[in-house]
Image: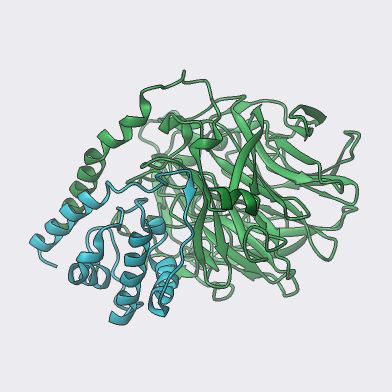
Chain colours: A cyan, B green
Amino acid sequence: MSTRLALTFGLLVAVAACKGPTAETNTIEPIRLSSNEAEEGQVLFMRFCHSCHPNGDAGLGPSLHGFRHLSPAVHMQIRVGAGEMPAFHEELDSDDVDAILAFLRQLDQKG
Amino acid sequence: MRRAIAISSLIMSASACFHIETRLRQDAPDANERYVDASHVAVLRGFQIAPVASGLTFPAGITFDELGTPYVIEAGFSYGDAWAPPRLIRLEPDGRTQVIATGTDAPWTGVEYANGSFFVAAGGPQTSGKILRIDPSGSIEVLVDGLPGYADHHVNGPVVGPDGMIYFSQGVATNSAIVGLDNVEFGWVAQRPDYHDIPCQDVKLAGRNFETDNPLTPDPDDRAITGAYLPFGTPSQPNQIVAGAVPCTGAVMRVRPQGGEIELVAWGFRNPFGLAFAPDGKLYVTDNGYDERGSRPVFASPDWLWEVDTSQPPLWYGWPDYAGGIPLGDRFDKSTMKEPTMVLAEHPNKPPHAKASFAVHASADGIDFAPTDRFAPRGTAFVAEFGDMAPKVGRTVAPVGFRVVMVDPATGVISPFLTNVGDQSGPASRLKSGGLERPVDVGFTRDGESLYIVDFGILGVDEKPMPIKNTGVVWRATAIPSEAIARR
């Protein structure tokens, strides 16, 4: 990965991390996914992403909310890794990443 | 360079968010106070929450008698070297509390009521680990003694299985099998310099050693070389055999309700804190993952939910060389840039994969299963996330945990049930709100109509843990009647 891409991603991370990880009201809306792809993505997300980005929020890593417009960059980030984030090219193929992004898009729409 | 950029990105993330975090700090109470306001807790749609007891000191577990009356235990100890008498307390319907028993073997970390008795996991830094049996009059009997709970982690559980046996667990002595300066800082190495982790079966070491300062001698230049499963300052040799024994550390064990011989159920856990049997009779265990500390730090290790088949011979679950079924060195070396290579020359078996992975440093602790479909599909696990102890365990971009989550063991999907209101995460004392502080246990009433949440109270972390007594709370969540939902 080039330094420029890493820097770009770092800036995006800085912005996205400001999306708060907790509820805005005192009601948590249940997650209802409307496609099989998003449901598959949810399971993959829980297996590979949740531990550092719990439910898409900041944790060990930054928040992922708002990344739905950045699919190419996120594809690369997930597949090759960057900084302290490991590469998942052996565990996740392109369709898997698409499914994870579909899940994140629906998560953001809900929120 | 990439690492430097990533680090600067994280710094930018943290600083860019600071102004948001400060918005909730305008009506800050005194540092030692805790105020409680259920409206500051976000609850899954269709449910509501209310406090039922407050002013408790380090409450750690909850159980119910055959009439549905809730009982909590106060641990009597918190990280941060804070002590108080451990107690079993009944919560009366009018909000009053009545002390049933007071003990001496702190901490009391878990409680289960069965067949007219309370079973309590007890003991730690000052006394050996124990399983106690307490009758409703308050009489205390030691059912199991001599458990190796002196060090980083203590005795946990217990829970009564479908077979009538008392299941309990014992956390490991260290972070990742090497006694190091982190353990010296905790204080137990100076008190027990020969103490170390105990494998449940014989293990063959790879001979890897870790060199540190040696603060146990007056020579400031003295160095200590330490191997796995060995005392501080004792190096290991390739192919060295360390004898296994039961009781051991990092294990789930069981004993008959009358006491007697301890049986090994499973091992290779790190800190198996929460034990619960699902409605289908399977045992599930929450396990606190590695920290980024000590001689063998492990970066980005989540906590896990394990399924344990109690009818099979004892299975090894991977500690200290695997994390959730993944070998160390594969994915857990990014921060220190040092590969935490294997310390065992041979592994007892290929460890299973976890049923679910919680957030790194969330501290997934108490667990219970929905006994009916009232809260969630029967068999859904509810887990208390105590919340991170950063920076002592490793750093995070944002506070992690401090909530109650639902877990589908079939898919590993985790979703929030309770969390604090607001655009930032963290304990209520940090958010300056009246919400959740540190959920440590959950328990459904036997009819499945209520979920009780034990909130340990304020435990801040700076240079060291800073617990505050009399700040523990018990909450109760219930379903909102359908007619009330319709009016909303």
Q: How many numbered marks have been drawn onto this rendered protein structure? A: 0
Residue at image location 77% in from the left, 41% down from the top: B70
Between B23 and B485, the one lying in front of the other is B485
- Give coordinates of residue B163: x percent, y percent: 84, 66
For the N terminus of chain B, the image quarter is: bottom left
Residue at image location 25% in from the left, 65% down from the top: A68
- Give coordinates of residue B126: x percent, y percent: 67, 33
Where is residue B287, by image quadrant?
bottom right
Between B311 and B398, the one lying in front of the other is B398
- Give coordinates of residue B6: x percent, y percent: 20, 53
Q: Residue furthest top?
A: B30
Residue B417 in view (yes/no): yes
Where is residue A69, by image quadrant?
bottom left
Between A89 and B33, the one lying in front of the other is B33
- Give coordinates of residue B255: x percent, y percent: 82, 57
Residue B125 in view (yes/no): no
Q: Residue furthest front?
A: B487
Between B475 and B121, the one lying in front of the other is B475
